[in-house]
Image (spheres, rainbow, N blue to C red):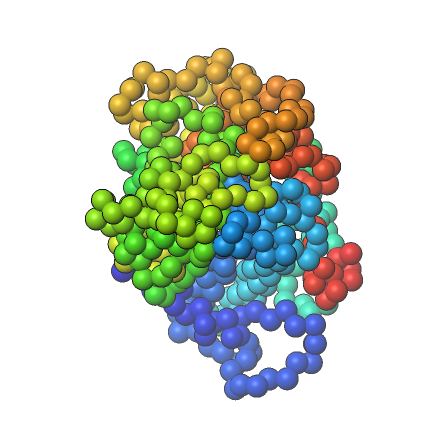
Amino acid sequence: MKRIKNYIIYFSLAAACGYSCNKDLNEKVYHDVTEETYTYTDAYQAIGILYANMRGLFNHVNYYMANETSSDELVMPANASGWDDGGIYKRMHLHTWNSENPQLTNMWNSLYPGVINANSLLEQLDADKIPLPSGVTKEALGAEIRAARAFFYWLIMDNFGDAALITSTSKDLPAKSTRKDIYNLVVTELTQAIPGLSEDKNQLMYGRFNKWAAKALLANVYLNAEVYTGEAKWTDCLTQCNDIIASNKYQLEADYRSNFITDNQNSTEIVFSIPFDENQAGGQSPHMYSWHGALKDKVNMQATPWGSGSAMAVSQFIDTYDAQDSRLSDTWLYGPQFASDGVTPLKGSYDQAGKPLVFTKDIPDGLYTGESEGYRMNKFEVKTGARGSLSNDFPFFRYSEVLMMKAECLLRTGNAGEAATVVSNVRSRAFKANPGKATVTAAQLTANSRYKYGYVENYKIVDAGDTSPIPYGGMLDELGWEFAWEGHRRRDDIRFGVYTKKSWLSHKPTGDDRKTFMIPQSAVNANPNLQ
């Protein structure tokens, strides 16, 4: 059984006393247990709520799909089975979201409880209200809590830019802080916390911030520093990556898919994961909103995917793959679909009713598709008998990402040859049948992207839009193939200058202000200081 039992199953109790965002400062207590009277039995119970907060980010109306479907990788069109839902999905694709889009509200309401809980835990730790396990110091536990708080603040500043900066349990309504102020807090917190974090990579530290996970987080912050503050930090990012590599704690899995199987907690490549369990820690459900309902019989699922599914590949993104790259089939589900016997064709139920279900690459636009159009999710294994939630842990930071961050920093600092060697190493497992294709050159990494951008109508590009070359476009392509379905693409698109400049499917640029999401209206209503 995964280590989530050690701390995450305490979520329901801890949540009762750990976070409250009610505007009423004199709220009525309806039970005997309050934040002041609740006592923890051990430190793992206390910190469990921090990691449990992270699970809420991974559904189709929260951080995960907001970052994927606002990028040039994924889209969630309507179809004959529904999936319009008042236009909330297409607005992400079109970059016309507003402050009432549920994706933004849910993201905000998932991230800030993490901050608030971390603040509370730090104060309780300082007051000696959290029992410490043998061999764990107050400083070490405090460092882990601060690293987790930095994780939440990183995602807040990455997604919302200027936002509330709260570091205590004061109930005063906070003012809005600048993105740079939040960036500085994150860097300071991580820099100070890292020396006190455990260097262990074991079952006890699985799904928690050890030193290497915190360094991977700090490397990501530095990687995007120019976006956040206007000042590039490539050398600082490179230092963090080299430290992780030198630890010899992690290595690439020989098989790419080993990172995404049901029991992936033993992956040698996962640096930091969000643990899930179909029974005790649900919320990992990409199959439910990407798969067609008929695919229930593909693996004899106990649950039925929703309608004909929606989350699918932007066909222009798929066109960038080399046909011999095994990550294509490891990531995307396409072609004829069969029942668990491998023989009986699965059939459509809507516009393809009674016809064999065959997932095709091309889609007419980003707004409405047929039920069998679009490549679907194949990255996370859907085991035989799967339920609505999967037990696959989400690999938030992988060792391949550490290597690819190093390669990008080398590339951007004039060491393209060394960068190509690193990228070729990552590519090698994807071209086992044709090893020669695994090698990428410096010229390829610095060349323009293979992505054919442009506005699509009726399956064809009718307006190319901005056609200027993308600096280091080959590197952007490499990141896309390695990390599709892992929540990276929006950040990468922004960093490479694509997100608000290029057109794809039904998306046309709508302005640089779309590099961040607006603060949800419900948060502004609760705190006018955030206007």
Residue in the picture at 52% in, 40% down: 74
Foreground residue among 28 and 483: 483
Quarter-of-image position of residue 512? top right
Q: Is residue 363 above or below residue 475?
A: below
The answer to whether residue 517 is left or right of residue 148 is right
Query: Residue 112 at x, y = what percent?
Result: 60, 59
Residue in the picture at 44% in, 14% down: 441
Question: In which quadrant will I find the N terminus?
Answer: bottom left
Foreground residue among 176 and 93: 93
Q: Residue furthest front?
A: 354
Query: Residue 189 at x, y = what percent?
Result: 57, 49
Residue in the picture at 45% in, 34% down: 361
The answer to whether residue 355 is left or right of residue 59 is left
Residue in the picture at 50% in, 59% down: 56
Q: Is residue 334 above or below residue 530?
A: above
- Residue 296 visible in image: yes
Query: Residue 400 at x, y = what percent?
Result: 40, 34
Q: Is residue 373 above or below residue 418?
A: below
Foreground residue among 78 and 387: 78
Question: In which quadrant will I find the C terminus?
Answer: bottom right
The answer to whether residue 375 is left or right of residue 60 is left
